[in-house]
Image (cartoon, rainbow, N blue to C red):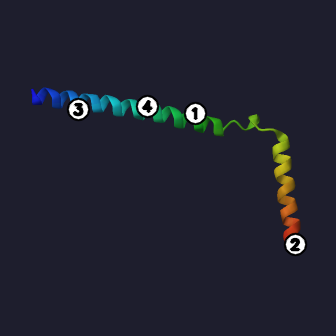
Amino acid sequence: MGYKMDTYLKVMVTIITVCVVIVTLIIVAEMLSRLGHHEDYDEGYHEKLDYLIDRIEQLERD
């Protein structure tokens, strides 16, 4: 009986591990795919960022 439980436990742990790995890979793939979609960002965001960078550089010079 101990042998069957040991085998059952190993199989269950393996199945759970595989499921966790698959879910993790799916989450990572979604995050990476979202990084590539820069068209979702507002152009105004980049303009504001450029303005802030220019302003910081001006303040450093003064």
Q: CA distance from mark 2 to mark 4?
A: 52 Å
Task: Kindly identify which numbered label has been placed on residue 30.
Answer: 1
Sequence-wise first label, 3 or 2: 3
Residue 61 badge: 2
Q: Secondary structure at mark 4?
A: helix
Mark 3 lies on residue:
10
Distance, label 2 to label 1, CA atoms, is 42 Å
Q: Residue at x 73, y 38 (%)?
A: 38
Mark 1 residue type: Glu
Of labels 2 and 4, earlier in sequence is: 4
Q: Residues within 10 Å of mark 4 (few under 14, many from 20)?
A: few
Q: Earlier in the sequence, mark 1 or mark 4?
A: 4
The spot of residue 18 in percent (x, y) is 36, 31
Q: Which residue does the image show at 87% across and 61% down from the upper left?
A: 55
Q: Secondary structure at mark 3?
A: helix
Kind of residue at disc 2: Arg
Determine whether 48 is above or below 36 in the image: below
